[in-house]
Image (cartoon, helix red, strand yellow):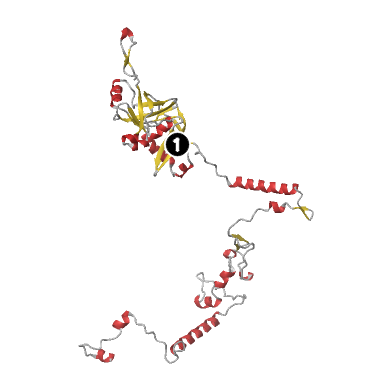
Amino acid sequence: MMHGWFAGGAGGLPHPQRFFQEDYHCYSVAYADKPHLERGDKILLPPSAFDTLARLQVDYPMLFQLQAGDRTTHCGVLEFTAEEGCVYIPFWMMQNLLIEEGAVVSVKNVSLPKATLIKLQPQSVDFLEISNPRAVLEHALRNYSCVTLHDIIQIPYNGKNYHLELKDVQPAPAACIIETDCNVDFDAPVGYKEPQSNSAAARAGDTAVSDAAAMAESNGIVNGGNTVAAEAMTPPKPPGVRIVNGVVVRPETSSATSSSVPMDLVAERTGGTGIQPNAMVTQQQAAAAPAVEYWAVAAGSGSRLDGKAATPLKGSNGEVVDVDKVRAAAAEAAQKRAEAQLTGIFGNGDAPVVSKRKSKVGSKFSRLKQTSAFQGDAQAFGK
């Protein structure tokens, strides 16, 4: 152990030593039943270390350098409650030091400058799923005392651990981040690929088409004396439903779906009278549409809110429909149906069809009770 006093002053008087260094057996914080310390860089030292540090003129906050072989990292201290000869550190720090449980590490107190810049690189593209990574990192770094260049720190968020490597630390390879104004920057995550822009994809497609055309021409593929380069340069048809000349083209068909609507019923321009060109009325839709008689009967008089004359209805062949005649025919048909129902044509043929079902209200209140103490006119009328 290297702490306490050493000789060398004037007159042989001892001078106080300002550093602490001790070797301990290292264990993860899970052995001390404090797994929450994995969220930061705090360690647990034995009480004897506190007694020694209290006699030394150390800087606060207390920061320590952990060294195992040729690998070093830095940390802070939370408590002095570990067993003598042992130190408990987060497991991610043990991974940075490449040590296992029970390995010997050297603990030395150090003084670190304030950090001014930290550059981090996520070790997985999953880090991009975080909506606000800067805020998450700022909250997580509150549990850290210092950072070391090339260390890989662990940040838990939303039930998942994210690992980030310290690619740059300024102004020194190790710096303190307690009560400091530090700039944080991010590098692209490991395995991240830049998305290809539309212009770059278009250029790549044009290059591929040009190469195919050049290859076809160089191979001498000739059709009627002309090199078949147009077929090679023709881009493939895009999959899915698309619109060609105002009509729908589905993947299973190579041509536009024909419309059963005559062209003289199509509006000359968008917003004009008639069927709009972008309506895309297919044969199935035209067959399912109501007939012109429906609009003549159910659409009212056809008056417009702006006071202008209503557009006359036209049939499937383009002829103007006589609305009054259609309505008269519909009224006559409705009257015949009513008479047929009353005469029993739609029933047994003997009597009009009368529903045998009675509503609850009708069976309860539509008739007066036959046995009643009231013998007035209403009762007599009911008889």
Residue 84 at x, y = what percent? 30, 26
Q: In which quadrant of the rendered view does residue 275 lie?
A: bottom right
Residue 167 at x, y = what percent? 48, 32
Q: Residue at x 58, y 58 (%)?
A: 240
Foreground residue among 382 and 73: 73
Q: Residue furthest left?
A: 373
Residue 296 at x, y = what percent? 53, 77
Foreground residue among 111 and 165: 165
Give the position of the C terminus as an image quadrant: bottom left
Q: Is residue 179 left or right of residue 323?
A: left
Q: Is residue 335 left or right of residue 52?
A: right
Q: Residue at x 72, y 51 (%)?
A: 229
The secondary structure type at the circle numbered 1 is strand
Please state the total of marks drawn on the protein image.
1
The answer to whether residue 142 of the structure is visible from this angle is no
User: Relative to residue 41, is residue 334 depicted above or below?
Assistant: below
Q: Residues within 10 Å of mark 1 (few under 14, many from 20)?
A: many
Q: Residue at x 32, y 36 (%)?
A: 34
The answer to whether residue 9 of the structure is visible from this angle is yes
User: Relative to residue 240, is residue 163 depicted above or below?
Assistant: above
**Amino acid type indicated by mark 1:** Leu
Give the position of the N terminus as an image quadrant: top left
Residue 373 at x, y = what percent? 20, 88
Q: In which quadrant of the rendered view does residue 100 lie?
A: top left
Q: Residue furthest top?
A: 11
User: Relative to residue 331, is residue 169 depicted above or below?
Assistant: above
User: Relative to residue 261, is residue 46 depicted above or below?
Assistant: above
Q: Is residue 197 left or right of residue 126?
A: right
- Which residue is the site of mark 1? 164
